[in-house]
Amino acid sequence: MSLVGLNKLHYAKLTKDDSTGVTYSTVTRIVGAIEADIEYQTNATTLYADDKAFAVATASGDIKLSLNVEDLPLDIRADLLGHTVKNGVMEIKGGDEPPYVAVLYESQKRDGSIRYMKLLKGKFQEPNDSAKTKTDTPEFTTPTIEGTFVNREYDGISVKMADSGSTAFTGASTWYNSVEES
């Protein structure tokens, strides 16, 4: 089913991920989602025997997420990248470590139903900044931030997705209440 929209982009910091469970901070909205691009890293190897392809082994790797947004306010950018904001000024230090975060959003499907997405454990890298002078025809420049997502330690899950068109899915109204509630 084709997707025709992107809406309600959110994130939450992963504060605990071990054999006893997972916890996240409060889910926070990022207004102005333009594009979310997920690239699943998978590898396959074919074993040949008896002069033919005999078996295939696959392995899942990390997941690349690219988010293009209308704006990435400094408080959110600092939160996603481990920076500090003092008196409205974001400070980037060499030792800043991005925290693990979850990303949540939804996309409308061609049939009008909604695809809900949660990427559960990833870190973002510093986005490039660009600006252009105005010309006769204004042109927008918007930030894109990229992250790498992996499986959680607690349960090995990296992504949760659901479709509102499924009668078995009843968590649409609580999808953004917390990362684990759905």
Image (tube, rainbow, N blue to C red):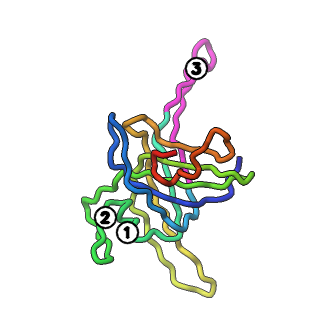
Q: What amino acid type should be assigned to the residue bearing mark 3?
A: Ala
Query: From the viewer's perspective, is residue 70 above or below residue 122?
Result: below
Residue with the mark numbered 2: 83
The x and y percentages for residue 103 are: 47, 53
Which stretch is magenta? 37-59
Which type of secondary structure does the marked residue at label 3 adopt?
strand
Query: From the viewer's perspective, is residue 30 above or below residue 97?
Result: below
Q: What amino acid type should be assigned to the residue bearing mark 2?
A: His
- Picture disc at residue 75: 1
Q: What amino acid type should be assigned to the residue bearing mark 1?
A: Asp
Give the camera-side residue of 9 and 41: 9
**Mark 2 / mark 3, whichever is N-terminal:** 3
The x and y percentages for residue 32 are: 54, 68
Q: Quadrant of residue 74?
A: bottom left
The x and y percentages for residue 19 are: 33, 34
**Mark 3 / mark 1, whichever is N-terminal:** 3
Q: Main secondary structure of the magenta part?
A: strand
Q: Is residue 26 left or right of residue 56?
A: left
Which mark is nearer the camera, 3 or 1?
1
Alpha-carbon distance for marks 2 and 1?
9 Å
Query: From the viewer's perspective, is residue 139 above or below residue 176?
Result: below
Residue at the image point whose x is 55% and y is 60% from the top:
8
Alpha-carbon distance for marks 2 and 3?
48 Å
Q: Is residue 103 left or right of residue 165?
A: left
